[in-house]
Image (cartoon, grey):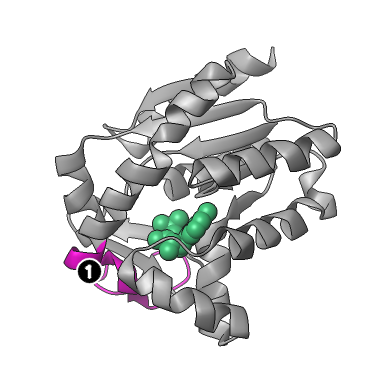
Amino acid sequence: MRLVLLGAPGAGKGTQAKKLIEKYGIPQISTGDILRKAVADGTPLGKEAKSYMDKGELVPDSVVIGLVKERLAQDDCKKGYILDGFPRNTAQAETLDQVLAEMNAPLDVALVVDVDKDDLMKRLTGRRTCRGCQQMYNIHFSPPKKEGVCDKCGGELYQRDDDKEETIKNRLDVYERSTAPLIDYYGKKNILKTVKGVGSIDDIFNNICSILDSQQS
Ligand code: AMP
């Protein structure tokens, strides 16, 4: 299954993607995670990307598209994948379609995780991520058992630089302006599905699985 997850920052795409990996045995390709790793490793690409990420702006298409192409060519993507955070604008979506057409492997589903704007702010400011295993928590809705420590691996929890309030506002604006139009884009291609991103993580996950399973049968 070749899947694109769409939705505003904070909609829970990453959390759901991690559960989907386990159930369907396909990798998650998160451009945000790839870029954050490049920043942490201090690579030239990471240094270039950081200035955009800290402001909540999109990293230039040429950089991100190159990363995704490279990743899609790897063996573990043959069975399918979950694209999380890519594409982020129409130019990226068009390039992705071209690349996949050349591979004779078009997308199966573009799934929107839909959450109201007011909820998004609280989710993003409360978000904490484990430095070790990338497990995500929310200090308001799903706190770890011990403050600042990952339940799964005992790693240190941190707040992403771009989860500070001013940056979040900008990321939500960028989403409305650049990424939300992709809902129409995939609607016209008849591969769009929508799931409400409110309620428990497991309920949302079950709704997503029903949609995907009905798609596969
Ligand atoms: P995310 O973790 O998906 O919210 O991404 C964090 C940040 O990485 C974004 O605010 C952008 O600065 C950058 N980023 C991630 N994916 C993309 C993309 N597809 N195109 C451009 N920038 C991206």
Q: Main secondary structure of the magenta part?
A: loop
How crowded pointer 1 is (Cα within 10 Å; few <14, some 14-19, many 20+) is rated as some
One can see residue 205 in this view: no
Please, is residue 91 above or below residue 170 in the view? above
Instruction: Identify residue type, mark 1.
Output: Lys
Task: From this view, report whether residue 41 is shown above or below residue 105.
Answer: below
Q: Which residue is mark 1?
A: 164
Q: Which quadrant is the N terminus positioned in? A: top right
Q: Residue at x 76, y 43 (%)?
A: 99
Queried whether the magenta region covers residue 145, the answer comes back as yes
In front of the other: 32 or 122: 32
Please give the name of the residue rendered at 35% of the width and 73% of the height, measured from the top-left corner: 54
Is residue 32 in view from this perspective?
A: yes
Q: Residue shown at 18%/66% (left/top)?
A: 166
Residue 11 at x, y percent in the picture: 34, 43
Quadrant of the snapshot with the C terminus: top right
Left or right? Give the position of 169 relative to 185. Answer: left
Residue interval drawn in magenta? 143-167
Total number of numbered labels?
1
Assign a secondary structure to mark 1. Answer: loop
Q: Please state the horizontal and vertical placement of residue 44, each as a whole percent of the image.
A: 61, 85
Asked whether, in this view, residue 94 is left or right of residue 175, the answer is: right
